[in-house]
Amino acid sequence: MPPAVYAAVAAAGLAVSAWGVRDRTTWFLETVWALVGLPLLVLLWRRFPLTGLLCGLLTVHALVLAMGGHYTYAQVPLGDWVRDTFGLARNPYDRFGHLMQGFVPAILVRELLTRTSPLRGSRWLAPLTVCACLAFSACFELLEWAAAEIGGHEADAFLATQGDVWDTQWDMFCALIGAVLSLAVLSRVHDRGLRALEAAAEVRAGR
C-alpha cells in the first residue's frame, strides 16, 4: 500500500475522532503522539522512508489512540462490550492501548536501531529494543502522574485507572508483553521489509 494511503487513513481517523469528543483535553493528551508524529514522518519521508510493515502498524496505532481519545479509554464502547461479554471487572481497552504502546514502538525502535546503529544482527538488538519500549512506557506513566498532580480529578479521564491501585504497573507490564510479542512474531517479516527498502534505495541510487 502506498505510504500516502497510510497517512490519509491515520489523518482521517484523527479528524473523525476530534468530532464531538467527550473531553477535549483528554483527546489531545491521548492523540498528541499521532498529531506530532504524522507530520514529522511526512516531512522526513524523502530522507528516511519507513518499511511498509511499520507504516501499517503506526496507522493502526494512530486509530487506537484516536478511538481512546474520542471516548476516553475507560468508556470505549468496544471495551464495554468485551467487559460485559466476558464478565470482566473493568473496560479492557486501556490495557489493549498499553499493549499496543509496546507492540508498535518495538518495530519502530528496531527499525531505527537497525538502520542507524551498529546493532544490526547483534544479539543486543532485541533486549535493547524492549528496554527502549519500557522506558517510553515509564515516561508515559510519569506524564500521567504529572497530569494528575496538575489537573486533580479533572485528569481522571486521562488516567483511566478505573479504581485499580496497580494500574501503573499493569500499564507497563502490558507494554512489556506487547514489545516482546511484537519482536517474537514480526522480526522476520520486518527483516524482509528492511531488505526490500534497501533494495529500493539501491535502485533509486543507480538511476
Image (cartoon, helix red, strand yellow):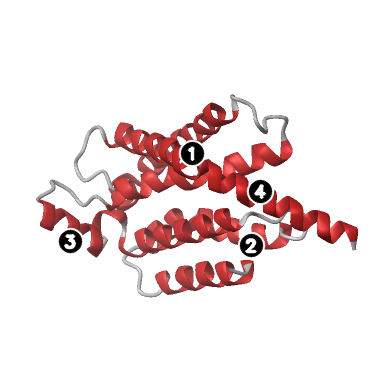
Mark 2 is on which residue type?
A: Pro
Mark 3 is on which residue type?
A: Trp
Residue 128 rendering spot, x and y as whole percentages = 56, 28
How far apart, in angstroms, are the residues tagged by discs 3 and 1?
A: 30 Å
Label 2 CA crowd tier, 10 Å (few <14, some 14–19, many 20+): few
**Which residue sits at x=87%, y=57%?**
205
Q: Which mark is first along the chain, 1 or 2?
A: 2
Mark 1 is on which residue type?
A: Leu
Left or right side of 178 for 109 = right
For the C terminus, the quadrant is: bottom right
Q: In terms of secondary structure, where does tag 2 sit?
A: helix
Q: Which residue is mark 2?
A: 39
Nearer the camera: disc 3 or disc 2: 3
**Which residue sits at x=72%, y=30%?**
118
Task: Identify the mark at residue 194; answer none if there is no mark.
Answer: 4
Residue 54 rendering spot, x and y as whole percentages = 56, 53
How far apart, in angstroms, are the residues tagged by discs 4 and 3?
A: 38 Å
Q: In terms of secondary structure, where does tag 3 sit?
A: helix
Q: In terms of secondary structure, where does tag 4 sit?
A: helix
Would residue 39 be seen by someone viewing this image from the given angle?
yes
Q: Which residue is mark 1?
A: 183
Nearer the camera: disc 3 or disc 1: 1
Q: Quadrant of residue 121?
A: top right
Compared with 39, 150 (above or below) is above
Q: Which residue is mark 3?
A: 81
Q: Which mark is first along the chain, 4 or 2?
A: 2
Please, which residue is most extreme toward the right here? Answer: 207
Nearer the camera: disc 4 or disc 3: 4
**Which residue sits at x=17%, y=61%?**
81
